[in-house]
Amino acid sequence: MLRENNCGAAELSAMNKSLLHSEILTGWVFNTQRYSLHDGVGIRTVVFLKGCPLRCEWCSNPESQSGKPEIAVDVRKCLGGTICGLCESQCQTAALSYTPTGEICLDRHLCSNCLTCTTHCPTQALHGFGEPMTVRQVLDIVESDSIFYRRSGGGLTLSGGEPLMQGMFALALLQEAKRRHIGTLLETCGDGHWSDLCQIANYTDAIYFDVKSMNDVQHRRFTRRGNHRILNNLLQLRQAFPHLPIHVRTPLIPRFNANWHDIQAIIDFILPLSQVSYEILPYHRLGRDKYRLLGRDYLPAEQLLCDEVGADIIQQAKTRCGERYGAPMA
């Protein structure tokens, strides 16, 4: 079901004509995850788009942050220059070389991220994060599991990165999903243009909206962006779409928001909003190895969150929110 509001019917109609049946509109996708059970109701296919305005220190998908393709380097898989050397011979910017011990080395300042080297690497020691895909290509993959969506109430989940960074492409994907009678859900950090979010909301059945902190100073320190636009977008979203289910999520992060004072402030902000549920995402370090592949430091390093502390905060949140705690089940 499509939603109507004051976002501009004429503009939506024009975009329908230009985007809905487009086979040339492309966007950057870094992963397509089928049979997901944790990103919305039912069995879902999650499409991860490149690009994010935030730089969260704990980000589990660092390959999503840049809007451009990136090369991952896994020296443990490299055969070395003596045995192989295929990638170095293909590099047009002299960004690839070998160490005295034979390990591949990528100078990311010289690299153009053309990904040519990745197509010649026989062991995938070099592989790319991100590929251009058309709306049709993405939806053909998503639609291949439509039988599971019908039986479970699932569908397409658009995630990232931040889908609002590719607003036109994200809108076209959701429009095409609706045309194919596929359920839709948007996962967002909320840091995007309201005009994009407003148009996209017309074509999504629910939105998972991250609120990480009410403290703007802390938010800037740990994500390099303020939270004013995020919070304003949430309020506008609720006002413009009063019946659209919104599920707010907060990742629990040591030194950042892993205390009841910060979590309570978020809950106090969202409880006055109707049809808004809430959930805390437990702390994890599952994306740690990706930083090594991208040649970056993993800032949380060995930081841990005591299980008892996390469990206590979650229990307090459940008590405070009551029936509005937890991801929607239907």
Image (cartoon, rainbow, N blue to C red):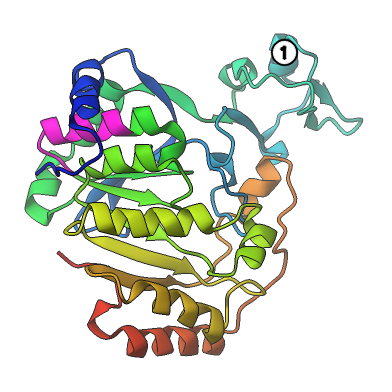
Residue numbers of the magenta segment: 171-183
Residue 206 magenta = no
Q: Amino acid at mark 1?
A: Cys
Location of residue 323 in the rendering, given as x and y in whole percent from the top left corner? 23, 82
Q: Is residue 274 visible from the viewing direction of this image?
A: yes
**Secondary structure mostly seen in the magenta stretch:** helix
Q: Which residue is mark 1?
A: 91
Identified at 39% across, 43% down, the residue is: 194
Residue 178 highlighted magenta (yes or no):
yes
Q: Nearer the viewer, residue 85 or 295?
A: 295
**Relative to 17, is 28 above or below?**
below
Q: Position of residue 80 (x, y in %)?
A: 76, 27
Image spot of residue 44 (x, y percent): 24, 49
Q: Is residue 212 left or right of residue 113?
A: left
Q: Horizontally, is 94 left or right of 292 in the view? A: right
Q: Quadrant of the N terminus?
A: top left
Above or below, 83 relative to 241: above
Q: Is residue 47 visible?
A: no
Q: Residue at x 55, y 87 (%)?
A: 309
> Please, is residue 115 above or below residue 46 in the view?
above
Q: Is residue 35 left or right of residue 91?
A: left
Q: Secondary structure at mark 1?
A: loop
